[in-house]
Each structure stands twice: as structure tokens, then as C-alpha cells.
Amino acid sequence: MEFNSLDAQREACEAYIKSQRHEGWSCLPAAYNDGGFSGGSLDRPDMQRLMTDIRAGALDIVVVYKVDRLTRSPADFAKLVELFDAHGVSFVSVTQAFNTTSSMGRLTLNALLSFALFEREASGE
């Protein structure tokens, strides 16, 4: 069975966060979980709550199991990264090479966003 249930994803994220305890990381007790909603839009209840909490300074790192669990839209992903940057929030994908707490992770993310922008512009042409 594919490892994709929401509970299993949460467990993987919690385990990753625990592995970073030496860096001062701790897991929030409440999850942001939009099960049943499409990742193609940011108009989801817990996504809106996450964005509100980021603006309020309630967290400084967003940890996801996989990037497409956050959003499936490159444009929305770029908007989220802008929100993260504006509020000093780092982004980590447990199963992919995204960890913007490091300079290499930020470089990787910026390269991906550049390709997403190119794809969007090429599609427009």
C-alpha cells in the first residue's frame, strides 16, 4: 500500500521534526490538514488557517511530507514562498530535497521556481 494516508504523512513529518530537536525544532500540537480538498487551490480551510498563522508569526518552519501536499499549482507555490519569505518562515519537504533552512535548500527551491515561471511563460506564448 502506498504511503499516503494523512496519519502516515503526519507521522513522517513528526519524526523528521523530532530528528531536528537539536536545532530547537518542535511540532505544533494541531495539524493543518485539508483532507478531502483539492491541492489545486489555496482556498482550503486549513491552508487559510496556515497562512493566517504565518502572518501572525505563530510558526517559523512549515514541514510537509511532499510538496504537492501543500499545493499542486506552481503559481500558488510561488505565492506561498513569497509569504514564507516575507515572514521569515522556512519550508521543508520530508521526502524531497527542499529545506529552506539552508542555503542549498533555498538555491534548489529558487531553481525550481525559475523553471515553473519559465513553463508558465512558455505556455502563454
Image (cartoon, rainbow, N blue to C red):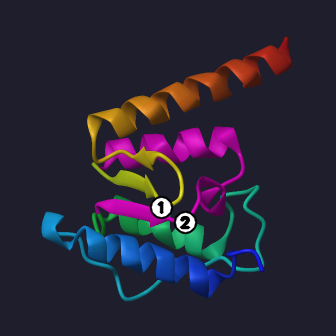
The residue that label 1 is drawn on is: 94
Q: Nearer the viewer, residue 7 or 42?
A: 7
Task: Confirm whether the magenta stretch covers residue 86.
Answer: yes
Q: In the picture shown, does residue 77 fall above or below 67? A: above
For the record, the magenta segment spans 60-87
Q: In the picture shown, does residue 23 fall above or below 112? A: below
**SS at circle 1:** loop
- Within 10 Å of disc 2 (Cα), the crowding (few <14, some 14-19, many 20+) is many
How far apart in space, not on screen, are marks 2 and 1 (Cα)?
5 Å
Q: Residue at x 51, y 48 (%)?
A: 80
Figure label count: 2
Q: Residue at x 83, y 18 (%)?
A: 124
Q: What's under tag 2, amino acid-wise? A: Tyr
The residue that label 2 is drawn on is: 65
Q: Residue at x 52, y 80 (%)?
A: 10
Q: Are marks 2 and 1 in contact (CB under 8 Å)?
A: yes
- Within 10 Å of disc 1 (Cα), the crowding (few <14, some 14-19, many 20+) is many
Q: Residue furthest front?
A: 1
Which x, y percent locates residue 99? 38, 48
Which x, y percent locates residue 77? 59, 45
Find residue 118 and report its image quarter: top right
**SS at circle 2:** loop
On-image quarter of the C terminus: top right
Query: In the figure, is residue 31 to the left or right of 75?
Result: left
